[in-house]
Amino acid sequence: MARIVKAGLIQCSLPLHEGEGSMEEIKDAMLKKHLPLIDEAGRKGVQILGLQEIFTTPYFCPSQDPKWFRTAEKIPDGPTVALMQKYAAKHQMVIVVPIYEEAMTGVYYNTAAVIDADGTYLGKYRKNHIPQVGGFWEKYYFKPGNLGYPTFQTRYANVGVYICYDRHFPEGARLLALNGAEIVFNPSATCAGISQYIWKLEQPAHAVANGIFMGCNNRVGVERPWNIGRFYGTSYFVDPRGEMLAVGSEDKDELVVADLDLDQIREIRDKWQFFRDRRPETYGDMTKLLP
């Protein structure tokens, strides 16, 4: 019997901008905007759902303002993870929950919690590659991840997470596959004119090189007052052949759904044999501090 998993991605615009409410009101409005989309995923039978990068807040990294530290939460003991655990159990749906994490007072990470279909917290991934370029001043807000490249055996599939800027680094995607990931979720916040031309190149390349599925989601709209550009959506699922299975619009809040045939992983790996023919003993220079 084929292993078919129905997977979903949510892409969402910011309903309340800075200056239109307190940080808690902005955060609450974003959370409430997601809940009907999560329920829609449940009604459509989605088994694994991915939310976008730091999904409860604006993408505040064009600023360097310490007030946004106050939006971080404990994982797994914060209110957002607790709420998502209830929704996961309600819909018997695995949920990948990317939020701003406070590990301890003054220490913050860009993190995604993974919740199983019965509401069990399985663990978290902390974004490893942190940009500090062109208005994406993330090193001010986020410490680099320190949990490696974990995967999570959920009820429906083995899931990995790779967050936004991580996608520019093929090494982590390979490690996620070697660690058993069948589906890798890449929650993102990326703008038109910056990386849109490679948005549909890099992740399909990861999928092909590693024989995995990838689910890649992006925000939509312009977020004030920063106005760094338009988040262009086009969230998608791609299979191990590099073929797009479903693609979202550029400008709408929506749920993107695709059926993933996990048996393709064995089929493609048996055909191409990239894992047989890789030569890790020749890659030692990759771990040296080269210029």
Image (spheres, rainbow, N blue to C red):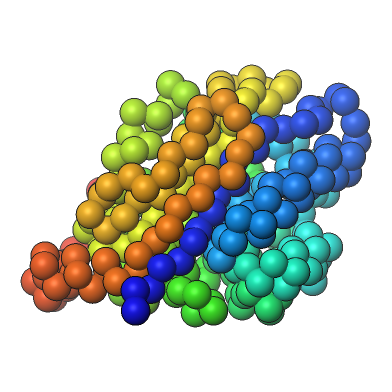
| 259 shown above or below 175 | above
Residue drawn at point x = 51 percent, y = 27 percent: 250
Residue drawn at point x = 22 percent, y = 58 percent: 209
Residue drawn at point x = 34 percent, y = 38 percent: 200
Quarter of the image with the N terminus is bottom left
From where the camera sits, is residue 262 visible?
yes
Between 221 and 89, the residue placed more toward the observer is: 89
| 236 shown above or below 185 | above
Q: Position of residue 128 (x, y in %)?
A: 48, 58
The mark total stands at: 0
Q: Quadrant of residue 44?
A: bottom right
Between 125 and 263, the residue placed more toward the observer is: 263
Report the side of 155 relative to 286 (left or right): right
Q: Position of residue 284 (x, y in %)?
A: 18, 69
Q: Position of residue 182 (x, y in %)?
A: 38, 69
Report the side of 214 relative to 88 (left or right): left
Residue drawn at point x = 55 percent, y = 50 percent: 9
Q: Quadrant of residue 176?
A: bottom left
From where the camera sits, is residue 203 visible?
no
Between 13 and 237, the residue placed more toward the observer is: 237
Q: Residue furthest front?
A: 1
Between 277 and 279, the residue placed more toward the observer is: 277
